[in-house]
Image (cartoon, grey):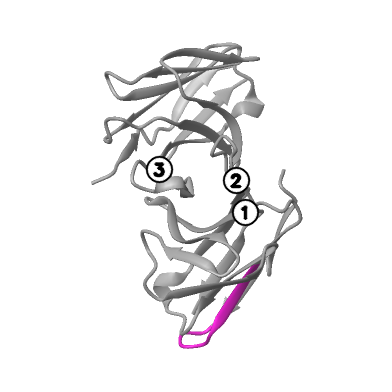
């Protein structure tokens, strides 16, 4: 069964700290991984995607991928109260062919305290 | 953003009535998706489309049908709404040959009484 697992949280960090969000997936061989941010009552918006093992940085965000261990993480440096949201991890469905279907985790709720 | 709109944004209906939700995009994206989002379940794929008149079922398709007669429009129909279909519905689109990134519409909150 295809699964994407995230700790539901809430994860609480003080302003200025590093927030670390983790995600594991079940399908060995998965190739494409995504992090979305969703504010309460809003739609998901893409933060970044990662395909290769290692780190990928974009501003205050760093995605880390370890295919051997089947996990992907998102680090948020210098966390701000505006980062308070639910973060969704998504993995491309291996068996979805060219349709690009994504399997989403249930999300981790992050709270950044001033 | 992929210029995605959804209508209606909010709807309250009664059990047994038909309901149609519309997703409209202006970016000529080939792929379109319908998801529902419920507490404790996250985003689950209902149906998707890979071109005009080309659709297929997702994880939770029972009780739903879709149609796509034009590239820009993807309709989700609940033939006979049930209380278990109370949810927030999101449409998403993806450009063919892209990075598999999906872009989401603003969502429709549906309540079935």
- Quickly name the residue at label 3: A106
Please state the extent of the stretch shown in magenta in the rendering: B14-22
Q: Quadrant of residue B70?
A: bottom right
Question: Please, is residue A87 above or below residue B86 in the view?
Answer: above
Q: Mark 2 or mark 1, which is nearer the start of the sequence? A: 1
Q: Quadrant of residue A32?
A: top left
**B9 relative to B85 in the view: left or right:** right
For the point 66% across and 28% down, the residue is A82
- Quickly name the residue at label 2: B96
For the point 50% across and 30% down, the residue is A110
- How far apart marks 1 and 3 lie (CA) works out to 27 Å
| Residue B34 screen position, x and y as percent | 52, 60
Given contact means CB atoms under 8 Å apart, are the residues at marks 1 and 2 in contact?
Answer: yes
Please tell me which residue lies in front, B43 or A30: A30
Q: Quadrant of the N terminus of chain B?
A: top right
Quick one: label 3, few (<14), some, or many (20+) residues within 10 Å? Answer: many
Q: Which mark's residue is nearer the viewer, 3 or 2?
A: 2
For the point 42% across and 21% down, the residue is A73
Please tell me which residue lies in front, B59 or A76: B59
- Quickly name the residue at label 1: B30
Q: Is residue B100 magenta?
A: no
Quick one: label 2, few (<14), some, or many (20+) residues within 10 Å? Answer: some
Quick one: label 1, few (<14), some, or many (20+) residues within 10 Å? Answer: some
């Amino acid at each position: 069964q295809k699964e994407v697992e995230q700790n539901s949280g809430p994860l609480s960090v003080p302003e200025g700290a590093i927030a670390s969000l983790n995600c594991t997936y079940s399908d060995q061989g998965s190739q494409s991984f995504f992090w979305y941010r969703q504010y309460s009552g809003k739609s998901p918006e893409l933060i970044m995607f990662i395909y290769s093992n290692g780190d990928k940085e974009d501003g205050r965000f760093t995605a880390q991928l370890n295919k051997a261990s089947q996990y992907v993480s998102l680090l948020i440096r210098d966390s701000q109260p505006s980062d308070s949201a639910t973060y969704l991890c998504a993995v491309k469905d291996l068996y979805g062919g060219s349709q690009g279907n994504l399997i989403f985790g249930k999300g981790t709720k992050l709270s950044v305290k001033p | 953003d992929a210029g995605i709109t959804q209508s209606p944004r909010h709807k309250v209906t009664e059990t047994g009535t038909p309901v149609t939700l519309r997703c409209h995009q202006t970016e000529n994206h080939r792929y379109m998706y319908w998801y529902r989002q419920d507490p404790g379940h996250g985003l689950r794929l209902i149906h998707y489309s890979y071109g005009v008149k080309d659709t297929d079922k997702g994880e939770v398709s029972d009780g739903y049908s879709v149609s796509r007669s034009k590239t820009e429009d993807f309709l989700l129909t609940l033939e006979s709404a049930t209380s278990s279909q109370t949810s927030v519905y999101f449409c998403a689109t993806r450009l063919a040959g892209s990075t598999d990134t999906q872009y989401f519409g603003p969502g429709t909150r549906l309540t079935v009484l």
